[in-house]
Image (spheres, rainbow, N blue to C red):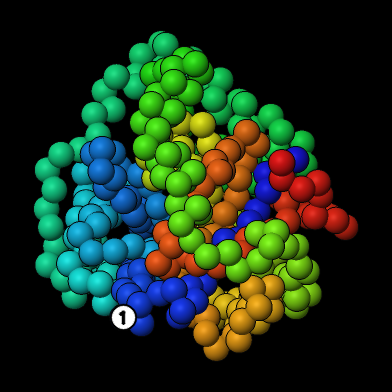
Amino acid sequence: SLGSVALALALATLLGTPIGAALKTVVYFHNDFDQVLLVYWLSNDGEYAIREKIPPGHWATQNTEKNVVFAVQSEKDASREATIEVSSNAGGDVRCAAASHDAQSFECKAEWKPHIREERIDLSRYSGEAWDAHASRWREACWRPLAKDHTADAEHFCNWEVKWRMLARCEFDHRPWEIQKNFWKENEHHFQFYRAQPQKLHNFTDKGYAIRDIPADLLKELRDLWLAGRLRKSTPEENGFFAVPIANCESDVWKLDLTPELTRKIYDAVRPVVAEWAGMPPELLRPTQMYGIRLYRPGSVLHMHVDKWRTHVLSAILEVGFLDFGSDAGASAQ
């Protein structure tokens, strides 16, 4: 397929979650500047992982938490940058607007104090003949399955500056066998935890999973949102070279954020379905997290994993469809 599109959400049962457990912080980035702005998350390994590409007059949301650092740059000039550290779990707005009369520089104001971070990614080694050949092959591989029937998608998903894509840099720096070796070495402790945690927890069902139909009106709204917004607001989801469950050394994954109104509508529709499956009253469930809409481009891997038991007690994945929905959603992701 050309890429599967899915939405994942989690609900916690109040029977297993402390009433006062903190929810994720949601930050709204508003672009009041006259140029496209790029929002980066500064990962633990010092990398700038792009999160959003926000056109003038648009806004985007990021689920985050206290002490996470974001950098906002002008797409035209990477030297123009504002850096924001989330210093509260209460959430809030970040508004980026012109900081001078000539509108050539901008500043981002938030309810927390900006945090200036000096270190930057060293991209100097991603240049020269070897890199240029690699970047050309990488872009061609991206274009090939899309060029005939999905030219607009090829323009959006394949025309980003290649050196800013973690997958492209990783494939340049490592051979395939090295990627696999490093991934399992980096995450051995995670998989040990994944094997051990389920043995200590209560089972709500005999089988552990079930398949249900998404309400038709909700599915249509999700599909319409993806088809309308994927070429304007979807951005690479980059969490780390060897992160789990999605490692950017082996996966090309994109994300389109939901509006607050649609987020509430999804929770309202899914809560009774999950409650019925788990055999408990819906009022005992509360929403804790939602990821997506997420596009898994061909070859991407979502590794087997378990979530945080305090906040992700019961979960659901909504399979929205595929890039070319046509009359059918296409074959299921494997």
Identify which residue, 161 or 26, lies in the foreground.
26
Q: In this image, 330 relative to 64: left or right? A: right
Element assignment for label 1? loop
> In the picture, residue 22 is in which quadrant?
bottom left
Q: Residue furthest right?
A: 327
Horizontal and vertical percent for residue 215? 75, 76
Horizontal and vertical percent for residue 143? 64, 32
Identify which residue, 142 or 63, lies in the foreground.
63
Identify which residue, 97 or 145, lies in the foreground.
145
How many neighbours does mark 1 have within 10 angstroms: few (below 14), some (14-19), or many (20 or more)?
A: few
Identify which residue, 113 or 97, lies in the foreground.
113
Q: In this image, 205 relative to 110: left or right? A: right
> In the picture, residue 94 is in which quadrant?
bottom left
Q: The disc labelled 1 sits on which kind of residue?
A: Gly
Horizontal and vertical percent for residue 245? 48, 44
Q: In this image, 309 relative to 95: left or right? A: right
- Position of residue 86 relative to residue 44, above or below, is below
Which residue does the image show at 58% across and 64% down from the upper left? Answer: 203
Which residue does the image show at 25% across and 43% down from the upper left? Answer: 44
Which residue does the image show at 26% across and 23% down from the upper left? Answer: 124
Residue at mark 1? 20
Q: Is residue 8 visible?
A: yes
Q: In this image, 110 relative to 255: left or right? A: left
Q: Quadrant of the C terminus?
A: top right
Q: Is residue 32 visible?
A: no
Which residue does the image show at 57% across and 54% down from the upper left? Answer: 294
- Position of residue 94 relative to residue 285, above or below, is above
What count of labels does the image hold? 1
Q: Quadrant of the N terminus?
A: top right
Q: Residue furthest top?
A: 129
Horizontal and vertical percent for residue 168? 46, 28
